[in-house]
Image (cartoon, rainbow, N blue to C red):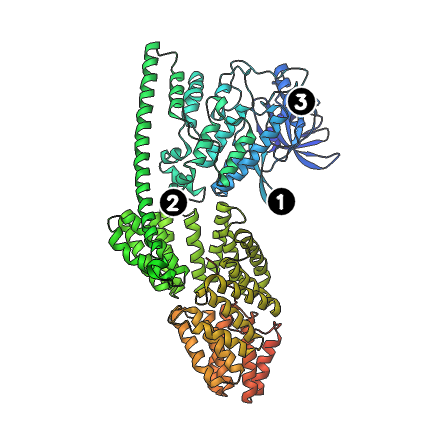
């Protein structure tokens, strides 16, 4: 129930006491605690019920002196109206009766809450969360309507938000001016006093403002819900409260019946400095809030606020359904009214002050204006369509010529996709120089196709050219420019320059945020890519936060089983696995793989990536046979789909090589490493992260085969590559130091091995934690060092440290996890 900020003590305000209840501050089974508020006809008290159950209730009693036959009838109507309803969003009625003085009362659920708008603002709920609460209110109103009850005074103070099971739940209270539509609630009809506004003007429907009360139906509550939605979205009312309250009765009626409120997005722009506070209360900024409201939410709110109730939503369920369609990114049933309809409304508002001839002229003028607007719109659309057709025609002609070059009758049978792309790329500048937008689109497509083929150098060249072309066409700040930046960053990432890729992605994200486009598909793509880069650079905390933000955006955009959701689930699982949280990673990888198979079928590069990720979990759990089967199936699938020299094939080979080395099968591990390193300098850049990782596995395999002298230069090169590309203290740098230390130990160069092993251990402890398998493996190597060196005291010291941790199934300390991020 609504509460006063600081209610006076009972002794100071007990109107019931003044009326002489059976005992001071109580009557019957109820003990009065404090008055919570009062309305036109009743008082609401916080009371303690003593039997048959002990609980706090809200007690509503007719005011002394207000118990006329009409008021009693209305009060009785409210009591019986509430008793008819059984819905979690509507406050429950427990009991009813009369006081010893004959004043009717009823006891209902005491709602420890606050007005809906105040709750949302205090917790700074975003638009989505506010809409979620609003749909629950609609469901409660729908229930009341099905019981034949109209509330007629829906407003924030009559919709309280309370906390149940740690989540907010709205509660509708105060059916004090409710009207029965389908039955007689008492033997006396519900009486509406003529000449008195029943309800609250700010939330009152046009038909309710007529005051007759004889033609009110459920759609009057739809209008009030529209006002509530408007206030939730903007923090302001459709009509200025001060202006409305200062007007006379006839002016209030005129405003409600005739004046059109601004759209919610427009209202934000009219608030001036207050728009900043309104946006802050919605956890955003004014420009982004306007962008959120423009379109669907404008249309939904304005349809609920239609003056003509036949054009409103006809039920509360229909209004809630349209809000859910907006939340699910589906087309909404509401839409902007046409010009003819707006003109008709204008004429109807002024029908008494306009002569027939003037009305006819206005109609003709409105019609002519509408036709002119329509003609201009058609002309713009025609020009736009013509330009789009010309653009499509030029792209189609270019693609046709490009594909024709692959005709074996022209170039012979040994035509490759790469050669076709090379020829097309060479022609772009000369053939499309006069059409920069088309040129940018073609170059972008060529660049991403090169990248898909693993040809990073031409991919980067064409994507840089596409970026320059789009800046020239659209300017430095545009969604297309942000897309180009993100695409180029992806190639820079693939060639191993993580820091530069991060800089470019941050630039793209900031641009999308300034343009109000960060909550869409482009924003999700950039967020996910930036998370992968931060993960690669060792900032797993920031990466996890971005992954979870990306996942929320992807689910909002595409549902629970989209491509984006599958990719982000997989990437988040990779991050958790690298921390050693395999229990958290496994369900994410299994769900991602299931979604990918459902979308792509049994054979697809993304399915192969998901198999590697799930295999890494099985490997960590000691199921080497299951992991090897997944790695080999993934390798076979990628070889079939992508060919032997694609970079993604190397990921499957690396996963398999790491597993074989961990199992002690060094010979077979070497056989998988060598095809990867054979691509160095051709398909993989010489300093690519996969090169460093594979050098490490090859070096460890050689150590296992007692060929430590051959292993040492490989492990030193792996360490140096990682030091050059990764920040100090990165776990992979520490892992490489530990691997090199193992090699030096095998060569019995104990003093040198000690320094390297200690640095590796300290780095792994700081980056991965004491209990991570990599850190435990590093401690095991230190024990082995001191035993071989003849230093038993040191060996015992490190063995004691080792004994405090449960050692997992042995895996190479340097193995990152075979799991791989997916685009």
Element assignment for label 3: strand
Mark 2 near mark 1, Cβ–Cβ under 8 Å? no
For mark 3, does the 10 Å Cα neighbourhood hold few (<14), some (14 to 19), or many (20 or more) residues? Answer: many
Q: Tell me the residue at 56%/62% (across/down).
A: 614
Using the numbered discs, state the Cα–Cα distance from disc 1 to disc 3 in whole angstroms.
Answer: 34 Å
Which SS class for mark 2?
A: loop
N-term-proximal mark, 2 vs 3: 3
Hey, which residue is sitting farthest bottom in the picture? 790
The residue carrying mark 2 is 516
Callout 2 environment at 10 Å: few (<14), some (14 to 19), or many (20+)?
Answer: some
Q: CA distance from mark 2 to mark 3?
A: 56 Å
- Structural crowding at the residue carrying mark 1, measured as other residues with C-alpha within 10 Å and reported as few (<14), some (14–19) or many (≥20): few
Q: Is residue 341 left or right of residue 615?
A: left
Earlier sequence position, callout 2 versus callout 1: 1
Find disc 3 in the rendering and name its residue: 104
Residue 115, visible in the rendered structure: no
Q: Nearer the viewer, mark 2 or mark 1?
A: 2
Left or right: where 554 falls relative to 136: left
Give the residue drawn at x 45%, y 44%.
283
Looking at the picture, does residue 821 appear above or below residue 668?
Answer: above
Q: Earlier in the sequence, mark 1 or mark 3?
A: 3
Image quarter in which the N terminus is found: top right
Residue 401 visible to the viewer? yes
Task: State which mark lies toward you, 1 or 3.
Answer: 1
Where does the image place residue 706, in percent across and percent down from the top left? 52, 85
Q: State the residue at coordinates (38%, 65%).
A: 495
Residue 165 is marked as: 1
């Amino acid at each position: 129930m609504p509460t006063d900020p600081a209610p006076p003590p009972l002794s100071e305000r007990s109107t019931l006491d003044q009326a002489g209840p059976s005992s001071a501050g109580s009557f019957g089974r109820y003990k009065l605690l404090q008055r919570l508020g009062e309305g036109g006809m009743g008082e609401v008290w916080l009371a303690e019920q003593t039997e048959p159950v002990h609980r706090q209730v809200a007690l509503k009693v007719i005011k002394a002196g207000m118990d006329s036959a009409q008021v009693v009838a209305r009060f009785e109507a409210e009591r019986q109206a509430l008793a008819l309803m059984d819905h979690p969003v509507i406050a429950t009625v427990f009991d009813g009766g009369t006081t010893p003085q004959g004043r009717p009362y009823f006891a209902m659920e005491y709602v420890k809450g606050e007005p809906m708008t105040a709750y949302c603002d205090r917790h700074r709920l975003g638009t989505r969360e506010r809409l979620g609460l609003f749909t629950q209110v609609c469901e409660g109103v729908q229930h009341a309507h099905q019981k034949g009850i109209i509330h007629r005074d829906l407003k924030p103070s009559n919709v309280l938000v309370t906390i149940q099971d740690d989540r907010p739940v709205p509660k509708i209270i105060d059916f004090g001016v409710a009207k029965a539509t389908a039955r007689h609630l008492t033997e006396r009809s519900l009486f509406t006093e003529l000449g008195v506004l029943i309800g609250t003007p700010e939330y009152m429907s046009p038909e309710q403002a007529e005051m007759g009360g004889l033609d009110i139906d459920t759609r009057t509550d739809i209008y009030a819900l529209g006002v509530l939605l408007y206030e939730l979205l903007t923090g302001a009312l459709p009509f200025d409260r001060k202006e409305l309250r200062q007007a006379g009765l006839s002016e209030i009626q005129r405003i409600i019946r005739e004046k059109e409120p601004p759209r919610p997005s427009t209202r934000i722009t009219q608030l001036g400095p207050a728009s900043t506070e309104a946006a802050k209360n919605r956890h955003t900024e004014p420009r982004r809030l306007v962008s959120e409201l423009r379109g669907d939410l404008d249309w939904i709110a304005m349809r609920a606020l239609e003056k003509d109730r036949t054009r409103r939503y006809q039920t509360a369920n229909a209004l809630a359904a349209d809000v859910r369609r907006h939340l699910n990114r589906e087309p909404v049933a509401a839409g902007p009214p046409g010009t003819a309809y707006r003109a008709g409304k204008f004429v109807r508002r002024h029908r008494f002050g306009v002569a027939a001839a003037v009305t006819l002229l206005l109609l003709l003028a409105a019609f002519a204006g509408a036709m002119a607007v329509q003609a201009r719109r058609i002309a713009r659309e025609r020009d736009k369509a013509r330009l789009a057709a010309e653009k499509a025609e030029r792209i189609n002609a270019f693609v046709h010529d490009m594909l024709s070059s692959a005709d074996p009758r022209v170039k012979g049978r040994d035509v490759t996709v790469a050669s076709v792309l090379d020829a097309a790329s060479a022609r772009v500048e000369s053939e499309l120089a006069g059409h920069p937008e088309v040129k940018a689109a073609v170059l972008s497509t060529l660049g991403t196709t090169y990248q898909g083929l693993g040809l990073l150098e031409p991919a980067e060249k064409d994507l840089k050219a596409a970026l320059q072309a789009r800046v020239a066409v659209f300017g430095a700040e545009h969604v297309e420019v942000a897309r180009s930046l993100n695409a180029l960053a992806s190639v820079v990432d693939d060639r191993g320059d993580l820091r530069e890729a991060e800089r470019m992605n941050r630039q793209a994200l900031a641009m999308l945020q300034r343009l109000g486009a960060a909550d869409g598909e482009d924003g999700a793509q950039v967020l996910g890519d930036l998370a992968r880069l931060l993960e690669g650079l060792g900032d797993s905390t920031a990466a996890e936060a971005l992954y979870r933000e990306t996942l929320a955006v992807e689910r909002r955009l595409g549902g629970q089983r989209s491509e984006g959701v599958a990719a982000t689930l997989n990437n988040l699982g990779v991050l958790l696995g690298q921390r050693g949280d395999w229990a958290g990673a496994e369900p994410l990888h299994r769900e991602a793989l299931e979604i990918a198979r459902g979308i792509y079928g049994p054979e697809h590069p993304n399915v192969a990536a998901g198999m590697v990720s799930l295999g890494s979990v099985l490997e960590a759990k000691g199921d080497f046979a299951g992991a090897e089967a997944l790695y080999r199936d993934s390798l076979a699938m990628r070889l079939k789909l992508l060919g032997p020299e694609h970079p993604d094939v190397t990921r499957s080979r690396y996963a398999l090589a790491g597993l074989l080395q961990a199992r002690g099968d060094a010979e077979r591990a070497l056989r998988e490493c060598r095809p990867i390193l054979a691509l160095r300098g051709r398909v993989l850049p010489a300093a690519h992260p996969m090169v460093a990782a594979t050098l490490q596995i090859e070096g460890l395999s050689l150590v296992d085969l007692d060929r430590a002298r051959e292993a040492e230069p490989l492990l030193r090169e792996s360490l140096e590559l990682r030091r050059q590309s990764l920040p100090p203290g990165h776990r992979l740098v520490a892992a490489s130091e530990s691997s090199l230390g193992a090699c030096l130990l095998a060569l019995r160069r104990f003093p040198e091995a000690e320094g390297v092993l200690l640095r590796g251990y300290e780095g792994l402890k700081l980056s991965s934690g004491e209990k991570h398998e990599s850190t435990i493996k590093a401690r095991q190597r230190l024990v082995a060092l001191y035993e071989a060196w003849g230093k038993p005291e040191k060996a015992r010291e490190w063995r004691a440290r080792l004994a405090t941790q449960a050692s997992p199934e042995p895996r190479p300390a340097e193995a990152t996890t075979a799991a791989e991020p997916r685009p």
